[in-house]
Image: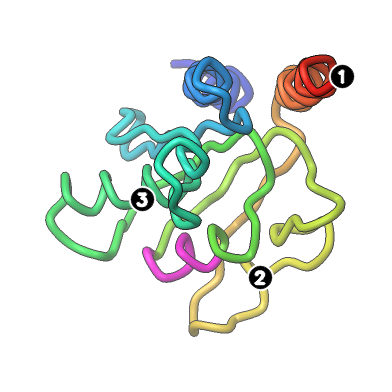
């Protein structure tokens, strides 16, 4: 049986694959996967620019797909792996879906709502809290975002 760190890295690598899909279409490279019983049940990556829809963050897309797959709005026993710390909307969506644990890579010191700025996941706002673990493969997760903005600045010159 794989240890916890191996499992965290395995699923974060899958989230990074999703982030690379976002980058390939000019989106902020954020990817997410939702896992239940050690199996990925849904995936998502940012599509808000390409679809012109503020709701299409990686986490919301993955939650929507997981709800449809499981047939309900609650996602018991599910964990989310995301390359960037969730924003207020995504932390709220995870709370509403009853995600049990969020694992994220890069910290978002400007608008992160899973520990950096505030921790919506642990405020008992919805009579429910989410366990949070940040910094999983942090260098890789923050690196893809830094590279994206570096390339964007080059294109804008």
Q: Nearer the viewer, residue 53 or 105?
A: 53
- Residue 139 appears in the figure: no
Cα distance in 3D space between marks 2 and 3: 17 Å
* Residue 12, horizontal then vertical, whole percent: 56, 25
Judge whether 139 appears above or below 118 on screen.
above
Give the magenta range.
Answer: 92-97
What's the mark number on residue 157?
Answer: 1
Q: Nearer the viewer, residue 129 or 41?
A: 41
- Left or right, 138 with reference to 48: right
Q: Secondary structure at mark 3?
A: helix
> Residue sitting at 49 percent across and 76 percent down?
128
Q: 10 Å neighbourhood of mark 2: few (<14), some, or many (≥20)?
A: many
> Residue sitting at 51 percent across and 25 percent down?
22
Q: Secondary structure at mark 1?
A: loop
Residue located farthest toward the front when viewing the structure as drawn: 157
Q: 10 Å neighbourhood of mark 1: few (<14), some, or many (≥20)?
A: few
- Residue 121 appears in the figure: yes
What's the mark number on residue 120?
Answer: 2
- Left or right, 18 with reference to 61: right
Residue located farthest toward the left when viewing the structure as drawn: 71
Tell me, yes or no, whether the highlighted magenta stretch contains residue 118. no
Please tell me whether mark 2 or mark 1 is closer to you in this view.
Answer: 1
Quadrant in the picture for residue 42: top left
Work out whether mark 1 precedes mark 3 in sequence or the reverse, and give the earlier one.
3
Magenta: main secondary structure: helix
Query: Can you identify the residue that label 3 sits on?
Result: 63
* Residue 5, horizontal then vertical, whole percent: 63, 23
Cα distance in 3D space between marks 2 and 1: 38 Å
């Amino acid at each position: 049986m794989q240890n916890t760190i191996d499992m965290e890295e395995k699923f974060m690598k899958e989230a990074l694959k999703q982030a690379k899909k976002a980058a390939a279409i000019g989106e902020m490279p954020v990817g997410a996967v939702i896992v239940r019983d050690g199996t990925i049940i849904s995936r998502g990556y940012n599509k808000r620019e390409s679809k012109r829809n503020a709701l299409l963050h990686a986490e919301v897309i993955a939650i929507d797909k997981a709800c449809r797959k499981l047939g309900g709005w609650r996602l018991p026993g599910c964990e989310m792996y995301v390359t960037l710390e969730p924003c207020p909307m995504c932390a709220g969506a995870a709370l509403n879906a009853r995600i049990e644990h969020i694992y994220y890579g890069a910290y978002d010191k400007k608008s992160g709502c899973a520990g950096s700025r505030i921790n919506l996941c642990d405020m008992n706002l919805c009579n429910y809290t989410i366990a949070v673990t940040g910094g999983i493969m942090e260098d890789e997760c923050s690196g893809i975002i830094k590279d994206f903005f570096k390339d964007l600045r080059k294109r804008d010159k």
